[in-house]
Image: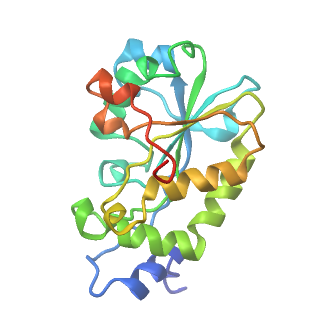
Amino acid sequence: MLGHVASPFSAVVRRNIKNPPEPLEERCCPDQMVGTLGQLKMDGKITQRSAVSARKKQSAVLLVLESPHTSEFIGSPGPAKGRTGQRLAMHALSLSGLQESGNAPLVLINAIQYQCSLGAKTALYRDEVFLATWREFGRSDFVARLKALHRPNDLVVCACTEGKCARSGVSLRQLVYAAIAYALPPGTRILRRTHPSSWFCQRNRDSEWPVFGT
C-alpha cells in the first residue's frame, strides 16, 4: 500500500506555520461556472455548478476571489459557498460595471485554490499562508489557470479581500490584481470590487479600490 503523498500546499503550511491545525484540508477547490448573472439573480443563490471545461464560446464574467474558507469544503469542494455565494448570487448583477451582463455566464476563480485559513478564523492564518503559498507556487499556478480560462471580450472582476497584512504594506488583492494584469493582454477590462461578503449595500457594490494606493 502506497503511503500518503502530501500536497504541495501542505508542505508550504508545515514549513511556515508552527503547529498548524490538524488535519489539514488538502483538497483543491476547483474553478467553476455557476450559471448566468441573470439566473443567479432570479434564484437568489447558486443552484448549479459545472466544470470550466464545459464552457461554451460566449464571453463570460471571470470573478476572482482570494482563497476558499470553510463552507467551500463542505461536500465536494466549490468556490463561493455559504453566505458569500448567496450574496454574490443576489447582488452581482447590480455590481457597478456588471448591470448589463445578465446573459453572461459567471466563472468563479480562487487565486489560491487551497484553504489558506486552515479552517480557523481568517485573522489567524489566512494571510500568512496565502503569502507563503503565493511565493512558492500560488502565483504561477494562478497565472497559468487565468491565461487558460480567459477569452477575448471576457470581463474580469478582482473581488479579493484586502487582508489584514495590508497594514504592513502587503495587500492580498493588490498582489492578485497585479498578477491578473500581468497574465492578460493589455487593454483587458479588469474591475476592482470589494469582496462579495460586503455586497449587502449598494455603496460597497459601487466601490472601486485604488491600485497600490493611487
Q: Position of residue 85 (x, y in %)?
A: 36, 34
| Residue 179 appears left or right of 48 | right
Number of numbered discs overlaid on the protein picture = 0
Q: In front: 147, or 175?
A: 175
Q: Residue shown at 39%/62% (left/top)?
A: 115
User: Taking 64 as reference, is 206 above or below it?
Assistant: above
Image coordinates for residue 142, horizontal then vertical, percent: 61, 57
Question: In front: 74, or 138?
Answer: 138
> Is 135 placed left or right of 91 in the picture?
right
Please tell me in which quadrant of the rendered image residue 84 appears: top left
Above or below residue 214? Residue 17 is below
Residue 195 appears left or right of 28? left
Task: Name the residue: 31% across, 25% down.
Answer: 203
User: What residue appears at the point 45 percent right and 70 percent down from the top-left corner?
Assistant: 131
Q: Is residue 42 left or right of residue 98?
A: left
Give above or below for 177 relative to 1. above
Image position, residue 119 (x, y; %) = 28, 63
Figure colour scheme: rainbow
Q: At 57% from the left edge and 16% from the top edge, which residue is drawn?
A: 101
Image coordinates for residue 1, horizontal then vertical, percent: 53, 86
Residue toward you, 162 or 86: 162
